[in-house]
Amino acid sequence: ELVKNISGLVDLERELKGLLKLERVIVVPGDSCEDETVKQEMGAVAAKTLSSLVNPGDIISVAGGSTLARMANMAPKKTKDQNNMIVPARGGLGERVEIQANTVAAELANNFNCSYRMLHVPDEVSKESLNTLLLEPKVNEILDLIKNANILIHGIGRAEEMAKRRGLSQERVSSLLDKGSVGEAFGFYLDKKGGVVERVNTVGLTLEDLNDINKVIAVSGGSDKSEAILAMLETGHDDFLITDEGAARKIYNLL
Ligand code: G3H
């Protein structure tokens, strides 16, 4: 807290909270695009914040990505089972197993000492296969839980980086960028205004579903992600933003 006050981060948090109309903004010192330990710190703060927001019986939905994987890693060990359930926000998006939402859910549940479910839906399936999968009672049971989540915690990435990381062809990457994609969150590619340019074909939460989720927490930092973060915030669905100084200062300058 002392470091934060000296570097003016408390004021920055307050300013951003007002300008972005969020319930809370937390800014971690440093820039995670230059220093990996900042991402770790952001993850730790996110896990602590999440832990403080969870009520007994809540269903927590988690997205994937390296930041969320850190969050799960750094989550405080809970000893009391508060009857919580952790579920992935959506099916496969083309990420490495280590940072998939399923993995984040399992690791977080291990630390929070609660149950979890995995959603085994392969990356980018055809409409026909999706419809067949939806006939599976087990898939439906998990989707029901996902749709009833009380809390969502998710990362935000740069559209280009995410598309490339998930192995999209150069053609598709170019097409996404030509159509104005700047940010990406749980499989939704967004333009500057928060409009959906494209969505990864899978099951789980849609942006509209976020209207019914009480607490939506975005965790994303790095000075290169300011535009991407703003794109997601433009959708108006987030309540909490946990970021770093690198992103926060750039976001402030963009507003
Ligand atoms: O959807 C957004 C990405 O999952 C963010 O990934 O935390 O590795 O930057 P990242």
Image (cartoon, rainbow, N blue to C red):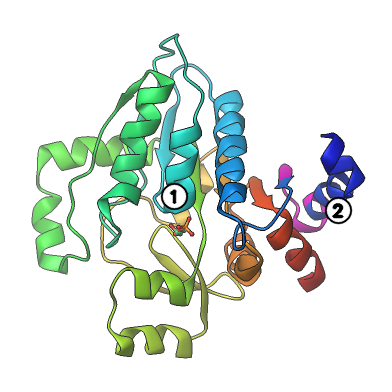
Q: Which mark is residue 209?
A: 1
Residue 21 falls within the magenta-colored stretch = yes
The image shows residue 18, relative to residue 168, as above or below, that is: above
- The residue closer to the viewer here, 125 or 206, is 125
Splitting the image into 4 quarters, where does residue 128 fall? bottom left
What type is the residue that disc 2 sits on? Answer: Glu
Q: Secondary structure at mark 1?
A: helix
Q: Residue at x 27, y 83 (%)?
A: 169
Q: Is residue 26 left or right of residue 67?
A: right
Position in image of residue 254 (x %, y %)? 77, 72
Q: Which mark is residue 15?
A: 2
The image shows residue 29, relative to residue 172, as above or below, that is: above
Splitting the image into 4 quarters, where does residue 139 fall? top left
Position in image of residue 91 (x %, y %)? 26, 52
Q: CA distance from mark 1 to mark 2?
A: 28 Å
Query: Is the residue indicated by label 1 positioned so its CB lies within 8 Å of ligand 1?
Result: no
Magenta part of the protein: which range? 17-26
Position in image of residue 184 (x %, y %)? 47, 66
Residue 150 visible: no
Within 10 Å of the Cα at label 1, are there few (<14), some (14-19), or many (20+) other Cα atoms?
A: some
